[in-house]
Image (tube, helix red, strand yellow):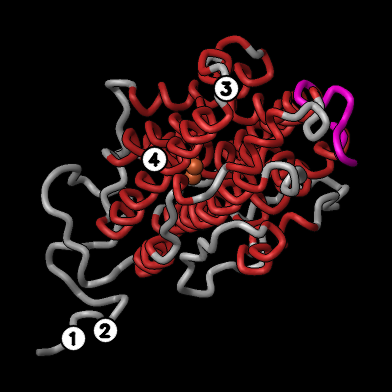
Amino acid sequence: MEPLLKDDFAQSKSKTGEILGEETEGVNQILPHMNRWAWDLYIKGAANNWMPTEIPMVKDQQSWKSKDVLTDDERLVIKRCMGFFAGTESLVSNNLMSLAKWITDPECRQYMARQMYEECLHNHTVVYICDALDLDVNEVYEAHINIPAIKDKDDFLMASTANVNDPHFETKTIEGKRNLYKAAFMYWIICEGTFFYSGFAMLLSMSNKIPGIAEQIQYTLRDERLHIEFGTKLLNTMRAQYPDLMTDQLEDELTQIMQRAVELEVAYAHDVLPRGILGLNADMFLDYMQYIANRRMEGLSMKFRYPKDKNPFPWMSEKVDIKKQKNFFETKVTDYQSEGVLDDDF
Ligand SMILES: [Fe+2]
Ligand SMILES: [Fe+2]
């Protein structure tokens, strides 16, 4: 039989490859490939299978019980990071469900379904860590209400979720497509691509004291990098498919959103690190968030850059390389990776 996987630009009577088509219900016709990049990311994601409960938490539990190992400031970092992830990882899942109604390309939908599963694992990670350390569940899960620096970030994100769920939302007009682009920018580039990174850096800086948490964050970070790559390619493909979509006004608006996100993230870092820990202080996160923001804007070919383009945590890219870290952590071998997808970029 003739293989079906042979042509990214095959002709099809019933498939166009358009990201925001008219059809929001019905069957998903994956072949012939028309957005092969989305399919390839789905394959990479599937090669990254992992499960939070397979990562031992014994050392973390010992550290949590000992006042000599973890200081009060370090405990605050762990609790705040869990509080932020508890709210925001669930928000990401909900965002994907909202967007799935509008993003009609079957290969993109295949990737998004995979991403939803990975977000379930990230939610599971928070539950698993809460259970292992016997954290105050209300303190963690109500942080998005009670901790101003976390509430501000979540409120900022939720405003755009409300837009997509508005009964008058549509993607048929160019204005509607712009609104979808803005929401996707908010979800993949701001929420996952910017807001998560300070928490990752804070927890990974304590790897030797909390190896179980750190290993779960490494797997989460590896997943998130693919999510950001998907979001970036989705936005760039939309821009190519709808040449009237991007305007100077929209680019200005998105740039202001990114600048506001960086401000909120730096305020969060000051709240979480009032005195600094292990060589980290809140001011370093200003540099870090500006560096990350520059990478995100670059990925989308947007003009804005922060002038100081410096990564204060070059060790972060090392931490993503799970194979190199395994001996360091001395944890159970959980190397599920079967393909080389750990590129050294952000
Ligand atoms: Fe996630
Ligand atoms: Fe994600």
Q: Residues within 10 Å of mark 2 (few under 14, many from 20)?
A: few
Q: Which residue is mark 2?
A: 6
Q: Nearer the viewer, residue 7 or 115?
A: 115
Which of the 4 image quadrants contains residue 48?
bottom left
Verify whether residue 325 appears in magenta. Answer: no
Q: Nearer the viewer, mark 1 or mark 3?
A: 3
Which mark is first along the chain, 2 or 4?
Answer: 2
Separation of marks 2 and 1 at Cα, in angstroms: 7 Å
Amino acid type shown at disc 4: Cys
- Give the left or right position of residue 205, taking residue 235 as reference: right
Magenta-colored span: 271-282
Separation of marks 4 and 2 at Cα, in angstroms: 33 Å
Looking at the image, residue 33 lies above or below residue 304: below
Which residue is found at the position 47% from the left and 46% from the top? 52
Q: Secondary structure at mark 4?
A: helix
Q: Secondary structure at mark 1?
A: loop
Looking at the image, residue 217 lies above or below residue 269: below
Amino acid type shown at disc 2: Lys
Which of the 4 image quadrants contains residue 344?
bottom right
Which mark is first along the chain, 3 or 4?
Answer: 4
Q: Which residue is mark 3?
A: 135
Q: Confirm or deny contact between disc 2 and disc 1 (CB under 8 A).
A: yes
Which mark is first along the chain, 3 or 1?
Answer: 1
- Give the left or right position of residue 235, taking residue 261 as reference: left
Where residue 325 sits: x, y (%)? 68, 63
Q: Confirm or deny contact between disc 4 and disc 3 (CB under 8 A).
A: no
Q: Nearer the viewer, residue 74 or 144?
A: 74
Q: Which residue is mark 1?
A: 3
Q: Nearer the viewer, mark 4 or mark 3?
A: 3
Where residue 216 sits: x, y (%)? 56, 47
